[in-house]
């Protein structure tokens, strides 16, 4: 990722090897690689309809649209100013025809996000429970970091309800919240895959990708983790391919499935 300062306290950040341009507030919530890894894990195909819940400034939505020509992405964002930045980012990236952004609350969703109509739904929910840690002074960062009126269970329920009967829901979250996610997904009647995101070889994972495929049954599959960095802090070859060259993160690839 590379960033350039823009007028009005905004920065222009280039993602996926310049394939995506994302406008962000200089002092607000900033995109991290979590969003890019999330987008890479969505198993969408050209012509399919997808939704990014809590899309922020649009990083994950735009990365998915840039990676897969012909896919359509609807972003839902509760903060109107971030939603507008996402729309502007889509225009700068040449993706406005396939990425639209709706302002709204998942607890009272707009009519644009009809239940059961999206082939794939993906989200990067707030990581912390209310009362956990110190809230950032910046409101946008606080809303993106700490759960508000919508709990993690509300996020998961919303995502599952918007997905078609054979679609997928993909979530990136803190690794220490994995048990909370799996507890809820245990009753969702779908096949669940879990992939830990590991900072470097031998380190404890900090993030996790969880994907549920509706309409399929089976035990939870704990996949091989993805190592993000080498010892010299360079991205690993797999991470480099995902983050700079728009390669997919195919969670069910045989290389990730444990024997």
Image (spheres, rainbow, N blue to C red):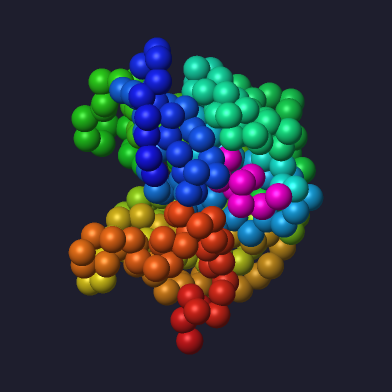
Looking at this view, is 250 or 122 the one in front? 250
- Residue positioned 24% across, 60% down in the render: 233
- Residue positioned 41% across, 48% down in the render: 34
**Residue closest to the far top:** 8
Horizontal arrangement in the rendering, residue 174 relative to residue 189 (left or right): left
Which image quadrant: the N terminus?
A: top left
Magenta segment: 62-69
- Magenta stretch: includes residue 66: yes
Vertical position of residue 155 compared to residue 33: above or below? above
Note whether residue 56 is visible.
Answer: no
Horizontal arrangement in the rendering, residue 63 relative to residue 180 (left or right): right
| Principal secondary structure, stretch drawn in magenta | helix
Toward which corner of the image does residue 145 lie, by quadrant?
top left
- Residue positioned 22% across, 35% down in the render: 133
Vertical position of residue 116 compared to residue 238: above or below? above
Residue 144 is situated, as x and y percent measured from the top left of the image, at 40, 31
Looking at this view, is 228 or 21 the one in front? 21
Note whether residue 52 is visible.
Answer: yes
- Residue positioned 21% across, 67% down in the render: 231
Residue 75 is situated, as x and y percent measured from the top left of the image, at 61, 34
Looking at this view, is 226 or 125 the one in front? 226
- Magenta stretch: includes residue 130: no
Residue 241 is situated, as x and y percent measured from the top left of the image, at 47, 62
Vertical position of residue 59 compared to residue 139: above or below? below
Horizontal arrangement in the rendering, residue 79 relative to residue 191 (left or right): left
Residue 222 is situated, as x and y percent measured from the top left of the image, at 45, 72
């Amino acid at each position: 990722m590379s960033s350039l300062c823009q007028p009005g306290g905004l920065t222009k950040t280039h993602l996926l090897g310049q394939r995506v341009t994302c406008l962000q507030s200089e002092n607000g919530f900033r995109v991290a690689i979590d969003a890019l890894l999330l987008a890479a894990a969505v198993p969408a195909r050209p012509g399919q309809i997808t939704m990014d819940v809590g899309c922020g400034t649009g990083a994950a939505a735009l990365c998915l649209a840039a990676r897969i020509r012909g896919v359509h992405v609807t972003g839902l964002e509760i903060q109107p100013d971030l939603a507008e930045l996402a729309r502007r980012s889509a225009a700068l990236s040449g993706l406005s025809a396939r990425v639209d952004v709706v302002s709204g609350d998942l607890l009272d969703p707009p009519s644009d996000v009809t239940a059961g109509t999206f082939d794939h739904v993906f989200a990067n929910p707030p990581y912390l429970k209310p009362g956990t840690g110190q809230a950032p002074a910046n409101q946008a960062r606080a809303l993106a970091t700490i759960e508000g009126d919508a709990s993690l269970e509300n996020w998961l329920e919303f995502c599952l309800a918007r997905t078609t009967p054979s679609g997928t829901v993909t979530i990136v979250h803190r690794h220490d919240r994995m048990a909370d996610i799996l507890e809820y997904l245990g009753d969702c009647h779908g096949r669940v895959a879990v992939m830990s995101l590991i900072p470097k070889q031998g380190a404890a994972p900090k993030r996790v990708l969880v994907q549920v495929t509706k309409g399929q049954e089976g035990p939870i599959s704990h996949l091989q983790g993805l190592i993000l960095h080498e010892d010299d802090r360079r991205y690993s070859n797999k991470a480099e391919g995902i983050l700079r060259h728009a390669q997919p993160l195919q969670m069910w690839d045989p290389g990730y499935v444990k024997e």
